[in-house]
Image (tube, rainbow, N blue to C red):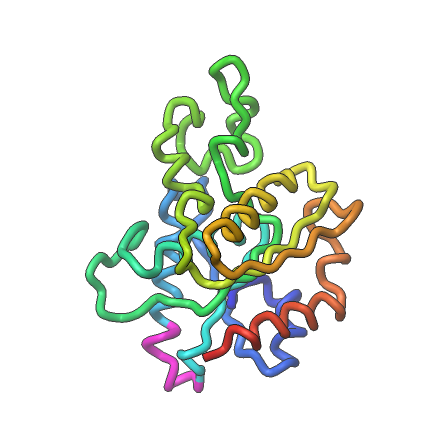
Amino acid sequence: MAGSLKVMTPMARRGYAVACVEYRPCSVALFPAQVEDAKTATRFLWKNAGKYKLDSRNLFAWGSSSGGHTVLLQAFTQESFLLDPEPGAKQSCKVNAVIDYYGPSELVHEFRITEGKQENPDDNGGLLLGNPVNEKRDVALKASPLYYVNPYVVPVFVVQGEADKVVPPEQSRWLVARMQECGARVESLFLPEQGHGGKAFWTAELYDRCDAFLQSCRR
């Protein structure tokens, strides 16, 4: 489970072991470094499960915004060695389920093309690709969780604000619709009048909902 320590404390109180994973920002390393770091961290948890008294059968990933994008890609490619820093590694990097808080799912549309040019290429994670998306469309597609969805991906709980101006709600709706079409398990909660984060995402009721979702995904 990944997330900031403060917002994950209520989950720790519910009995979860929480690991707050830091990945390289795009100002330091371009995509897919972020996904590679998440997989490396998960392998560390698997390898050291006994040392830290972790239940390796039940590892989950939780991320918000760019973190949501990262854990979706991590989980959706975990059955292969796509976007993996250790192709052929014997140590697992698998998680059981993902909680995605307002993460982008389709970067070609997320970076907005007008008359063949990307609007605000340095805004809203535009640096992730290293160039405007119209110059690196192939990389933008590889960095889009939406296109990795298949019937066998892990369950996902999507939480999104209806008034989000940073990651438009359509990003989450596309992901939910695609998973439903494929028959993959997905749950969603769209919060009316809520933007990109805020206190409404971290209420006792929402923690309870997330807890129930994760418990239903236990092995």
User: Would you say 75 lies left or right of 215 here?
Assistant: left
Quarter of the picture holding the C terminus: bottom left
State whether residue 153 is above or below residue 43.
Answer: above
Q: Where residue 165 appears, x then y in whole percent?
A: 69, 37
Of residue 88 and residue 158, the one placed in the foreground of this image is 158
Of residue 4 and residue 118, the one placed in the foreground of this image is 118
Q: Where residue 92 appears, x then y in whole percent?
A: 31, 69
User: Would you say 68 lies left or right of 150 here?
Assistant: right
State whether residue 63 is above or below residue 143.
Answer: below
Question: At 27% from the left edge and 70% from the top edge, which residue is drawn?
Answer: 91
Question: At 59% from the left edge and 62% from the top edge, which residue is drawn?
Answer: 4
Q: Is residue 63 magenta?
A: no
Question: At 68% from the left edge and 56% from the top edge, which residue is drawn?
Answer: 189
Question: At 64% from the left edge and 80% from the top edge, which residue is drawn?
Answer: 14
State whether residue 125 is above or below residue 218.
Answer: above
Residue lying at the far top of the rendered structure: 115
Q: Where residue 60 appears, x then y in whole percent?
A: 49, 69
Look at the image and give the residue range highlighted in magenta.
45-53
Residue lying at the far right of the rendered structure: 193
Of residue 111 and residue 52, the one placed in the foreground of this image is 111
Q: Main secondary structure of the magenta part?
A: loop
